[in-house]
Structures are given as structure tokens and as C-alpha cells.
Amino acid sequence: MKRFDKSSITIKDVAKRAGVAHSTVSLVMNDREHVSPKLRERILKISNEMGYMPNMVARSLISKKSATVGVVFPENPHFFTITYFLMIIDGIQNACKKYDRALMFFSLDQTKGESYYKISRKWLIDLMIILNVDYTRDISKDIRDLKDNGIAFSLVTKYNGKEKVNSVCVDNLEGVRLALEYLASKGHKRIGFISGSPNSADGPERLDAFKVLSKKMGFDQDEDLIVHGDFTFESGEREVPKLLELKKRPTAIFAASDYMAIGAMRAMKAQGISIPGDMALMGFDNTLEVAYVEPPLTTIRQPLQEMGEKAVDLAVRSMNEENFEPQMAVLKPELIKRQSC
């Protein structure tokens, strides 16, 4: 039997061995219909024996489409150190394996005129997942450009624009309700709140939920019980002293993200405050770090991996289903009880 250099095997070599047209092999490799199960099985067996691997780059150049999922996020030098995003990416990666797609990452700097659509065209990205939208800038035209040019995409956040788009988010109202009900069950009525970034979808939504539910549940309503962070460690450490300096301190602090809660924990310990003995502390997200701080942090779990996977599922469906209508998937949060309250 003739030996083949597996690195140079082409689709034509497989077709010649199988005695079929190379277009038939292409249909099999792209998992298309119009090939009988028996012939499909024979072609796959031959291609495996010969060590044939489809050249995805060449395929992209011919079709003007890629087998790549592009993950786009705002310019941030620390992006790949933030476990919140890494947990979402883990879900995206799981979906990429399911759909046999590669994964590429792109940082977006809108101040330099960059856009989601320009990235998609420059890199032949036909399926895009958008993370951490900065709502200080209007992205509606960019979103319309993606839709008008047939780029499949999903946002892993709630979309605030008028267009119908695929988006995946957590039920923030339910998450805040779970947190406040748990704190109430522990006897807390005076609760400080560290809000998140106003430039996001989650920040204002969690703040509004806190205001509405804390009033409905009869908690103290002093305006000074709310301070404003931006979802970072640093903002939690910076803002919590304002709550600690109040003449009448809160008995519990609820931070709108785990990172702010961890920053707050550091500042509280620096002042000799025992957690939860002197003051309870609670976060939101259930990122990887919170089980390993001392004390381990009670928090509201976002299903981050599931959110990443769902975002890819929706984008793939919008690409493959002719009459698919964009969807907003709102996933349920979960209370995770640990030792901080």
C-alpha cells in the first residue's frame, strides 16, 4: 500500500482513494446532507486512515467565513486575570468544542474607532460573543452593522438598545432578593450596599433592585447606606470605610460583586472588624476566589459557565435556523451559603 505523508494529504487524495468526487468528501467533512450514511461512514474511515485534517484557514479563505468564535471585550490590560470572565470563557470554550470551532480573543478600543463589525470583517469572524459592554458609548450602529451583514453574535449581558439581539444575563432582581431575604433571616435590618459600575447593565439593575426590595422589606432607608463602586477590588476597599464611619453602622454589607466584597473585607479587617461577628458581608457572582478568602464569602452565584455556553448556542442557532428570532436568556441565580454571614 502506498504510504502518504499525512501532513500533505488533501481532500482530493481522500476522494481518489474513495472513488468519489472531492465535492462529496467536502459534504461529509462539513457534516452536510445529501450523502448516504454508508458512503459517509466509508469516507470518514478512509480519511482517518490517511490522516486527513481539513485546512480551516484555506476553507475560510474560499468561503469568506471562518470556523472561529471571536470573543470581543473592551480594552483592559487585566482582562485575563479576572476570573469572572475566565469562567464565562470556560463555558464558551465548551460550546466551541461542541460545534468544532476555534476561539480567538479581541480587545476593543472604541476611542480609536474600533468596532465589533470592523473586527468581524478584518478577521473573517462570522460568529461573535461580546463581553462586558461599556454603555457609556452608543453601540447601536455597530450592532445594526453586525445584524445587517449577517454576522451571528450574542452578548453576555443585557442589551439596552432597541434592536432584538441574542443576549444572556442573570436575573439580577431575583439575585438581590435572595441576598436580602437571607440577610433578613439572620436578623439584619440595617444593610449597607456597595453598588457596581453605572456604565454596565448589571450595576444599575442591582442598585435599583436593592432600593426597591430593601424598602419593601422594611430595611433602614438612610441614603448613606449606599456607596458606589465599579465592580473592582479597589473600589470595594475604597468605598466600605464610608459605611464603617457612619454614626450608626450597618450590621451587614452587601456588595454587588464578589471583587468589591473581597476589597471591603480587606478594609474591614484593617479596622479590626470581625466578619461575621461584628458585621456580616455578602457578595454577588461566586467567582473562584470567594471560597478561599477568610472567612469564605457567602454570595449569589451567577451561572457564568452556563452563560458563556448559552451565548454560543444562541449565536449558532441564529446562523443555522432560517426563521430564528433573537432571544434574551435570563438565567437563575443561586444563594451560596458560606461563613461570612
Image (tube, grey):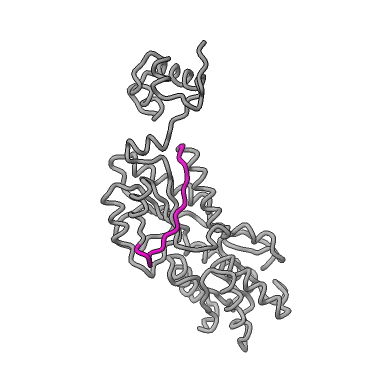
The C terminus is located in which quarter? bottom right
| Image height of 295 relative to 61, above or below | below
Position in image of residue 314 (x %, y %): 39, 46
Residue 210 image position (x, y, % from top left): 50, 72
Q: Residue furthest bottom?
A: 247
When the figure is inspected, residue 125 is found, relative to residue 242, above or below; the finding is above
Q: Residue most toward the top?
A: 1
Identify which residue, 164 or 101, lies in the foreground.
101
Quarter occupied by residue 271: bottom right
In the displayed structure, 158 sits above or below 206; it is above
Classify residue 115 as left or right of residue 105.
left
Relative to residue 2, is residue 121 drawn left or right?
left
Percent of width and height locating residue 249: 63, 83
Residue at x 46% of width, y 63% of height: 75
In the image, taking residue 341 as reference, residue 155 lies left or right, namely left
Looking at the rendered structure, the number of numbered marks drawn on it comes to: 0
Task: State the residue at coordinates (48%, 50%).
Answer: 308
Residue sitting at 47 percent across and 45 percent down? Answer: 103
Instruction: Answer with left or right where residue 216 lies relative to residue 249.
Output: left
Residue 1 among magenta residues: no
Closer to us: 208 or 261: 261
Residue 280 on image: x %, y %: 66, 72
Q: Which residues are magenta?
A: 100-113
The residue furthest left is 148
Q: Is residue 108 magenta?
A: yes
